[in-house]
């Protein structure tokens, strides 16, 4: 067992647990975006960063292991500035209209969605190229989960990867091919882990477009009924 | 040329097939050499042969800026428009070349004969403005008019320890002599070699200044069937060109350093990862490695492979470099675990900068006690300074730690502006960018600070990779900042949010600053972005992407305020008078030292006046 201090509270936790585990098990809220139990933690959204005494940079709670006599602050001034700014940058970059969790975080941290005027957004057309799901990368916040489950975190299909670099990074297929022309097996795992509605079941998408269930059923998409 | 002819592709990539995914970058380089670019069919042929998923191959091609997945010209002219070259007319040169060939920047002629591109720092800063041309397979360096197969080396300084073989542009094992330091090391116990390096106080010269001996000790103690030693020659920090000169003129020094490191930690394989913009070093290194093999220094027990990058600053970050050798996009990994236990291919790895490794034979030959006689107690040895920008004689300067900025600038012939008529080139110093794009600005008040890790740290300046880029009083610092912003936005890998979006937002705000179109609260906005990147980014790139900008905000706050470009006289935060005019930024007058420095060379004032008149006449 390990004893550490989070926000002034002394806590005891099992060996090998992360700071995020330690906080959550003790009712301390640390927000996360890219973190998902089913995927390898990459600590890339940095929204879960906390201040650890003796460390110059903020530390991602999702992967840093709790250690004896660690002193952690989850809501220091630095932490709040970083979280708020990351949220504001997200809001200035992509369409968060279907990311309720992130909207709530923005409210919690007093983040303004109009903090960055004249900011370039990552716009993209909706890609509707297969019977199972649609891809709207203007809603994608690059949490990597879809790429991970498509690869060695689950399906070993390797149909999607990254394109571009830096701010222009996006998820894509080999030379931007339509999904049916890739190795995609339409398993749907990527849709399941997408936190923002960037990947969406085709039927849900069509319902939102105003089609009725009956209209959708005659489109002949998806699995055929057994004879 | 979209149809591939597998007959020519297969033999070119055959030797990389056994490497599997790790052979991806070399195979893509080889394929691109044949076809000029990487089409869908070429990429899928490479993927099939190396057994790498198609989407992953595409992801890798997309990541590296020297790989093209659209047709480009048979001849590609890359003009450096980064900081040091911009001071010497890089933008104008690009414009001139585009006009001459009748193409736009980043455009390819219809007959696919030519592409002209602006480029981030090519590591040729002392030769600015620099142009790198690839014509079929031939790579040349020049200024647009004259072309050479390889750049010349300008090496100066009061001490020539690390650079004793550098400057005349030739190298051979015969000239270098036997690897006597290696022979001496082999007579010692590996742990004693590590102890000697620790005792020397050598710290990494790539920018992070981590104690080399401690790194070695970590890897030496790690238990594994395979360990690696890597020479990081992905020198891409704008303003840095020291490793280029060391490897071109004295490759054996770095190779001997690697051999000693390999013995000390028990590595049986080494890599030299060299940036893609330095293709002319590759044959020099290959020759040197062959000489070392013939002489028996390399062989079955330990050998070295060269890997060539493909245009990604981030791959200088050690874990991103591992990913790149492994055939992946250069995304930095989270640390811990550290490379000394989980490095390349998850094995214990020591990765050192070229200059660091060149120090190793020196230390072993002389012994750490003797080595420490140069430099200061806390910063022993000598240091290579890459002096560029507004000085009379830009070049590589070797000097003992403890040399002052003033002394260094004197060695380089003083501050001068080449745009001026010859008689009146001497100008006054405005500022120095220390440590590169990831560094910080110094002002005349820092002229007498000793250049040691400890003294610079005390005044908040990083030594970084040894960049000393000089800006004279006529330079518009807002243009400098704009280029910094562009550089980081171009080079961010896109993995972690603070840097992926922060470098973009930083660039946008700095573009406004440069155009004097700042919006209300841009100052605070820029600061929040900067601190968020510094505090919360995943790797060193993001953590330093705002470093120079934040330092500029302290020195010249008025530049970032609203309506900064109006010819106005306004008060800065501290209530002192600060002038912000369209063409230049003056350093804040805060101390006596800076006032002295400002006041000294009187004639310069006249020159400004003259210059202004000239400008008006145009």
Image (cartoon, rainbow, N blue to C red):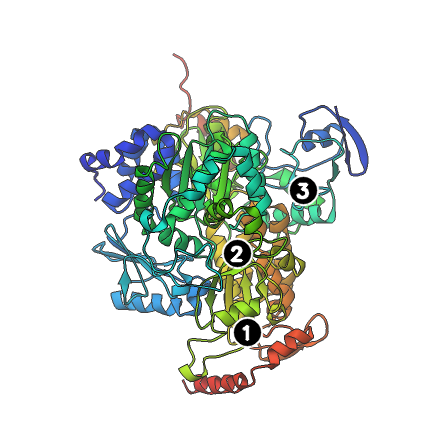
Instruction: Specify the label residue B382 is tagged with.
Output: 2
Q: CA distance from mark 3 to mark 2?
A: 51 Å
B114 over A64 or under it: above or below: below
In the rendered image, residues at marks 3 and 2 fall on the same chain: no
What is the chain identity of the residue bearing mark 3?
A
Instruction: Specify the label residue A105 is tagged with.
Output: 3
Left or right relative to B105: residue B518: right
Which residue is found at the position 53% from the left and 49% from the top? B541
Tell me the SS state at disc 3: helix
Pointer 2 with pointer 1, Cβ within 8 A:
no
B269 over B405 or under it: above or below: above
Res. A129 image quadrant: top left
B354 over B512 or under it: above or below: above
Left or right relative to B348: residue B551: right
Q: Position of residue B443 (x, y in %)?
A: 60, 69
Q: CA distance from mark 2 to mark 1?
A: 25 Å
Tell me the SS state at disc 2: strand
Pointer 3 with pointer 2, Cβ within 8 A:
no
Residue found at the very far right of the displayed protein: A9
Query: Could you tell me which quadrant the N terminus of chain A lies in?
Result: top right
Judging by the rendered image, the residue that carries numbered circle 1 is B429
Q: CA distance from mark 1 to mark 3?
A: 48 Å
Query: Could you tell me which quadrant the C terminus of chain A lies in?
Result: top left
């Amino acid at each position: 067992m390990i004893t550490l201090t989070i926000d002034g509270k002394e806590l005891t936790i099992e060996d090998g647990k992360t700071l995020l585990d330690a906080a959550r098990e003790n009712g301390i809220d640390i927000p996360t975006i890219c973190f998902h139990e089913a995927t390898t933690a990459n600590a890339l959204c940095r929204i879960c960063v906390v201040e650890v005494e003796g460390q110059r940079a903020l530390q991602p709670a999702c992967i840093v292991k709790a250690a004896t006599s660690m002193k952690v602050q989850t809501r220091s001034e630095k932490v709040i500035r970083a979280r708020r700014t990351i949220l504001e940058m997200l809001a200035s970059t992509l369409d968060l209209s279907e990311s309720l969790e992130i909207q709530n975080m923005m409210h919690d941290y007093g983040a303004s969605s109009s903090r960055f005027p004249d900011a370039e957004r990552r716009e993209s057309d909706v890609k509707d190229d297969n019977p199972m799901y649609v891809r709207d990368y203007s809603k994608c916040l690059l949490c990597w989960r879809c790429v991970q489950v498509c690869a060695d975190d689950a399906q070993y299909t390797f149909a999607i990867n990254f394109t571009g670099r830096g701010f222009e990074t996006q998820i894509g297929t080999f030379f931007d091919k339509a999904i049916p022309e890739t190795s995609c097996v339409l398993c749907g795992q990527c849709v399941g882990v997408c936190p923002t509605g960037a990947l969406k079941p085709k039927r849900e998408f069509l319902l939102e477009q105003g089609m009725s269930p009956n209209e959708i059923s005659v489109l002949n998409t998806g699995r055929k009924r057994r004879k | 040329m979209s149809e591939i002819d597998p007959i020519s592709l297969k033999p070119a990539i055959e030797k990389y097939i056994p490497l599997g995914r790790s052979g991806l970058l070399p195979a893509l380089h080889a394929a691109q050499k044949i076809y000029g670019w990487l089409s869908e069919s070429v990429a899928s042929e490479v993927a099939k042969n190396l057994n790498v998923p198609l989407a992953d191959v595409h992801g890798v091609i997309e990541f590296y800026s020297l790989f093209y997945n659209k047709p480009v010209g048979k001849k590609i002219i890359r003009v450096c428009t980064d900081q040091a070259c911009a001071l010497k007319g890089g933008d104008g040169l690009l414009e001139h070349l585009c006009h001459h060939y009748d193409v736009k920047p980043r455009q390819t002629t219809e007959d696919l004969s030519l592409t002209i591109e602006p480029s981030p720092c090519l590591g040729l800063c002392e030769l600015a403005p620099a142009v790198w041309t690839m014509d079929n397979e031939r790579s040349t360096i020049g200024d647009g008019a004259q072309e050479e197969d390889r750049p010349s080396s300008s090496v100066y300084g009061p001490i020539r320890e690390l650079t004793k073989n550098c400057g005349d542009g030739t190298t051979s094992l015969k000239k270098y002599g036997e690897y006597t330091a290696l022979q001496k090391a082999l007579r010692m116990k590996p742990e004693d070699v590590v102890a000697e390096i620790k005792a020397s106080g050598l710290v990494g010269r790539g920018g992070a200044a981590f104690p080399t001996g401690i790194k070695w000790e970590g890897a030496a103690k790690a238990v594994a069937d395979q360990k690696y030693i890597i020479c990081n020659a992905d020198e891409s920090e704008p303003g840095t060109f020291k490793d280029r000169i060391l490897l071109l003129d004295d490759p054996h020094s770095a190779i001997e350093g690697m051999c000693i490191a390999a013995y000390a930690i028990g590595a049986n394989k080494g890599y030299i990862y060299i940036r893609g913009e330095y293709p002319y070093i590759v044959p020099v290194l290959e020759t040197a490695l062959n000489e070392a093999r013939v002489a028996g220094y390399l062989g079955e027990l330990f050998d070295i492979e060269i890997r060539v990058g493909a245009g990604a600053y981030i791959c200088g970050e050690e874990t991103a470099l591992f990913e790149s050798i492994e055939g992946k996009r250069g995304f930095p990994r989270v640390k811990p675990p550290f490379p000394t236990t989980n490095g390349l291919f998850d094995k214990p790895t020591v990765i050192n900068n070229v200059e660091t490794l060149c120090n190793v034979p020196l230390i072993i030959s002389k012994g750490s006690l003797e080595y420490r006689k140069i430099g200061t107690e806390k910063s022993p040895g000598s240091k290579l300074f890459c002096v560029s920008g507004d000085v009379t004689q830009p070049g590589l300067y070797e000097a003992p730690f403890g040399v002052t900025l003033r002394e260094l600038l004197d060695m380089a012939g003083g501050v001068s502006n080449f745009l001026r008529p010859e008689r009146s080139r001497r100008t006054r110093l405005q500022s120095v960018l220390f440590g590169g794009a990831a560094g910080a600005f110094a002002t005349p008040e820092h002229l007498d600070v000793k250049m040691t890790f400890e003294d610079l740290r005390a005044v908040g300046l990083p030594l970084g990779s040894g960049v000393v880029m000089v800006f004279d009083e006529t330079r518009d610092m807002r243009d400098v900042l704009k280029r910094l912003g562009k550089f980081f936005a171009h080079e961010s890998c896109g993995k972690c949010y603070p840097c992926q979006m922060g470098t973009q937002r930083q660039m946008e705000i700095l573009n406004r600053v440069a155009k004097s179109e700042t919006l209300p609260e841009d100052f605070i906005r820029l600061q929040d972005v900067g601190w968020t990147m510094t505090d919360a980014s995943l790797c060193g790139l993001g953590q330093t992407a705002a470093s120079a900008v934040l330092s500029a905000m302290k020195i010249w706050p008025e530049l970032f305020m609203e309506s900064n470009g109006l010819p106005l006289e306004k008060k800065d935060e501290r209530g002192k008078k600060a002038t912000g005019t369209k063409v230049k930024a003056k350093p804040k007058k805060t101390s006596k030292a800076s006032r002295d420095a400002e006041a000294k060379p009187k004639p310069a004032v006249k020159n400004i006046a003259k210059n202004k008149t000239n400008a008006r006449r145009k």
